[in-house]
Image (tube, rainbow, N blue to C red):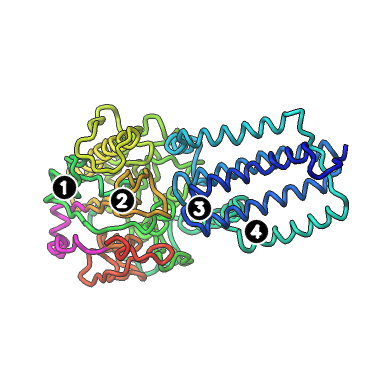
């Protein structure tokens, strides 16, 4: 049945329902999107996309197919609006390629943790409103789906839609989630293939002239997760979150001005553990610290309590795959019984391996990963209430998360100090270095909990960097007597491979002593982050 008037009741009702997601984006986006330019681009792009879908529907003559297309379109538009608004609500930024990388790496259990952490009552209400309208529109018998224009008007719609399609691709690609998802996934696959073909291999073809001492050596590199120095007692935090490390602080080198190049694990470790840097993010002749240790004659271990996702398939795990022995203590899930204490027996086994006198042991912790309450056993549920908490957000949720994060830090302190104790018991030429991939903002300077690249606070960027040296290591490396003087050096950790090489007495063709924090020739560089942001100017 054709519509007699373009303004009859059924037509108006149909248009209102079809445009409902657009109206929601326009209204709520005004309050949630802080920059007017970005808000206008989001609304215009979504309007274009809605128009394109409507125009396509007018090319369909079969009523059943057209009805099905209407329904699918409305569900798709509502879903896209929900994702956009949820991201702006939680992070106050547009979805970026780095965010997509996180989604592509995430398993179902970690997704569950993410949803529990960020899906709040307002977002549940938004979801229900959007999809209740969908349900009503799709199944209401009062609304006729059949709506057709004349051939001339269809051609005009098609021409306008073509212009809009070109504009979306050319001017609004950042706002188009479908295009961005597709392009980001292709980039991610290429990135991952590059790692599989190069960094996941035991040796690299890009380094030569690798040499090291042949004497007994044990080096342990601990890679933390989401741990900010802001919540660590040893860095001046008011709560006693690192009592074990604090007790032995005189035997530690506690570097006070170290920042991570990124605030997400994938992009951070991609630079920290390799020759890549913020200055050379696409370096093709890339090498990892694991490969460097292999080629220097060390027997390498990668012991991880992070889920590998499809067995050795996450990007950090692929880098670890180059190790001669890889052990994943968390092969089940992210939620139940994944405490980092599982690492300790595996470390002990590696230390007791007498077949190899030169060892580098990489340990990847769960640390203080979000879902903080799942990172420590009940015996570490020490911090409660509001004592010594400094935050402008005093809501029950904020206080609860701060306490959970501090408890996770307390347990992390136990794990790191136990690793040091085990290595110390070997009484040999050894050292332990601990750093975190990035930190978390836990209502310190923003009304926000978690981490994202776009809001990049001090709590997200400023990480612990702590070194323990054995007596024999100090004896064999007399230059260490000066290292206490270096702990205030301004460091951007994308040059870590050079510091790692000097710490483990490795020489190789690409070594640059000016980039090693342990070298007298060290030269601090401007800490320019993504989009040209000078960290030290913006965080005075």
Which element is circle 3 on?
loop
Name the residue nearer the viewer: 64 or 524.
Answer: 64
Of pointers 3 and 2, the one earlier in the residue sequence: 3
The residue beneath circle 3 is 94
Sequence-first disc among 1 and 3: 3
Where residue 349 appears, as percent x and y from the top left, is 29, 39
Task: Give the mark, 4 or 2, whose residue is nearer the N terminus.
Answer: 4
- Labelled pair 4, 2 in contact (Cβ < 8 Å): no
Foreground tag (1 vs 3):
3
* Mark 1 or mark 4, earlier in chain: 4
Query: Picture coordinates of residue 25 (x, y %)?
Result: 58, 46
Side (left or right) of 15 relative to 270: right
Q: Please give the residue where the numbered disc 2 appears in the rendered image.
A: 459
Task: Please tell me whether mark 4 sits on a helix, a strand or a loop.
Answer: helix
Residue 361 visible from this viewpoint: no
Pick the residue in front: 437 or 371.
371
Q: CA distance from mark 1 to mark 4?
A: 64 Å
How would you rate the neighbour count of disc 2 (Cα within 10 Å): few for under 14, some for 14-19, many for 20 or more? many
Query: Which of the two labelled residues, at mark 3 and mark 4, occupies the earlier sequence position?
Result: 3
């Amino acid at each position: 049945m054709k519509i007699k008037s373009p303004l009859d009741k059924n037509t108006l009702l149909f248009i209102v329902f079809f445009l409902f997601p657009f109206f929601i984006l326009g209204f709520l986006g005004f309050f949630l999107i802080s920059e007017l330019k970005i808000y206008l681009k989001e609304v215009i792009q979504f309007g274009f996309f809605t128009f394109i879908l409507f125009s396509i529907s007018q090319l369909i003559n079969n009523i059943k197919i057209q009805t099905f297309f209407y329904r699918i379109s409305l569900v798709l538009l509502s879903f896209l609006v929900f994702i956009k608004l949820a991201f702006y609500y939680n992070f106050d930024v547009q979805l970026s390629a780095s965010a997509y990388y996180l989604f592509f790496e995430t398993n179902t259990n970690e997704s569950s943790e993410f949803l529990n952490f960020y899906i709040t009552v307002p977002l549940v209400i938004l979801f229900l409103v959007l999809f209740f309208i969908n349900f009503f529109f799709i199944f209401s018998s009062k609304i006729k789906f059949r709506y057709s224009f004349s051939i001339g008007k269809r051609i005009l719609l098609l021409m306008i839609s073509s212009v809009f399609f070109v504009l979306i691709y050319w001017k609004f690609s950042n706002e188009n989630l479908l295009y961005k998802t597709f392009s980001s996934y292709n980039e991610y696959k290429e990135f991952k293939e590059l790692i599989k073909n190069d960094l996941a291999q035991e040796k690299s073809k890009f380094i030569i002239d690798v040499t090291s001492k042949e004497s007994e050596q044990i080096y342990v590199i601990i890679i933390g997760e989401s741990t900010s120095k802001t919540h660590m007692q040893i860095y001046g935090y008011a709560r006693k979150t690192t009592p074990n490390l604090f007790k032995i602080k005189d035997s530690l080198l506690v570097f006070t001005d170290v920042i991570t190049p990124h605030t997400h694990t994938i992009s951070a470790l991609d630079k920290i553990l390799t020759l890549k840097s913020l200055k050379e993010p696409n370096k093709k002749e890339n090498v990892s610290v694991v490969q460097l240790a292999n080629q220097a004659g060390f027997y390498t271990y990668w012991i991880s309590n992070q889920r590998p996702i499809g067995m050795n398939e996450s990007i950090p795990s692929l880098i670890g795959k180059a190790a001669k022995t890889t052990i994943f203590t968390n092969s089940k899930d992210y939620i139940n019984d994944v405490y980092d204490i599982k690492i300790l027996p595996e470390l002990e086994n590696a230390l007791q391996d007498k077949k190899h006198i030169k060892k580098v042991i990489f340990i990847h912790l769960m640390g203080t990963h979000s879902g903080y309450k799942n990172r420590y056993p009940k015996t570490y549920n020490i911090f409660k209430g509001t004592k010594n908490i400094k935050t402008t957000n005093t809501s029950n949720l904020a206080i609860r998360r701060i306490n959970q994060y501090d408890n996770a830090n307390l347990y992390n302190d136990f794990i790191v100090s136990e690793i040091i104790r085990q290595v110390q018991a070997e009484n040999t030429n050894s050292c332990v270095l601990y750093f975190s991939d990035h930190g978390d903002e836990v209502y310190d300077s923003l009304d926000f909990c978690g981490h994202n690249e776009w809001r990049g606070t001090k709590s997200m960027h400023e990480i612990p960097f702590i070194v323990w040296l054995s007596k024999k290591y100090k004896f064999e490396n007399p230059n260490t007597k000066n290292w206490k003087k270096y702990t205030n050096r301004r460091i951007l950790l994308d040059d870590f491979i050079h510091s790692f090489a000097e710490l483990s007495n490795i020489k190789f063709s690409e070594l640059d002593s000016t980039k090693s924090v342990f070298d007298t020739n060290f030269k601090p560089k401007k800490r320019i982050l993504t989009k040209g942001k000078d960290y030290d100017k913006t965080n005075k």
